Amino acid sequence: MKRIAILALVPLTALLAACAGPSNSGSVYSSYQTMNEQSVRMGTVESVRNVTIANPESGVGTMAGAALGGLGGSQVGGGNGSAAVGILGAVAGGIIGNRVENQANNRPGFEITVKLDNGELRSITQAADEMFRPGERVRLLSNGYTTRVTH
């Protein structure tokens, strides 16, 4: 029984680790982004559009669901029936695990269009954790790879 519990915990641990991806927030900096100079441009928000930020699937949800479904299904009945139910459980668990991972990977975001003081338009997509409204003055911070909009 302990062996089954351990086998069930391995995919669950991997699934939780996969959910802890990098943030797309304008307020969150990775450690490698600190202590680096950024260029600052000022502008005015032209428009804000709601978007969904989708991180790529890792497949962990499908694998974890299939493992758990197969383990649970194989405990039902005996002989060939047990194997058949285990296979069905694995397929159903894989489908459910995939859907759970898809939902966990999707985050709300904003596509923020900014008219810079020099007249150029820029559009930046980031997590929807800070509200922006058309007409607001904002800063665009850029290090050459990442640009974020802040107040």
Image: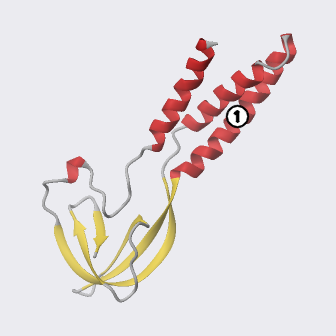
Q: Quadrant of the C terminus?
A: bottom left
| Viewer-proximal residue among 83 and 119 | 83
Q: Quadrant of the N terminus?
A: top right
Q: Would you place residue 127 above or below residue 87 in this image? A: below
Q: Would you place residue 1 above or below residue 26 in this image? A: above
Residue displayed at 48% across by 76% down: 49
Q: Would you place residue 27 above or below residue 40 in this image? A: above
**Lateral position of residue 3 relative to residue 133, left or right:** right
Residue sitting at the far top = 79
- Image quadrant in which you'd find residue 44: bottom left
- Say how the picture is coloured: secondary structure
Q: Amino acid at mark 1?
A: Gly
Residue displayed at 26% across by 87% down: 119
Q: Would you place residue 96 above or below residue 129 in this image? A: above
**Lateral position of residue 48 relative to residue 26, left or right:** right
- Image quadrant in which you'd find residue 70: top right
**Lateral position of residue 56 relative to residue 66, left or right:** left
**Lateral position of residue 61 relative to residue 42, left or right:** right
Residue sitting at the far front = 2
In the rendered image, residue 56, in percent from the top left (x then y), is placed at 49, 47
In the rendered image, residue 133, in percent from the top left (x then y), is placed at 40, 83
The residue indicated by pointer 1 is 93
Residue displayed at 30% across by 62% down: 27
In the rendered image, residue 73, in percent from the top left (x then y), is placed at 77, 24
Q: Secondary structure at mark 1?
A: helix
| Viewer-proximal residue among 2 and 31 | 2
Q: How many marks?
A: 1
Label 1, residues with CA under 10 Å away: few <14, some 14-19, many ≥20: many
| Viewer-proximal residue among 53 and 151 | 151
Residue displayed at 51% across by 72% down: 50
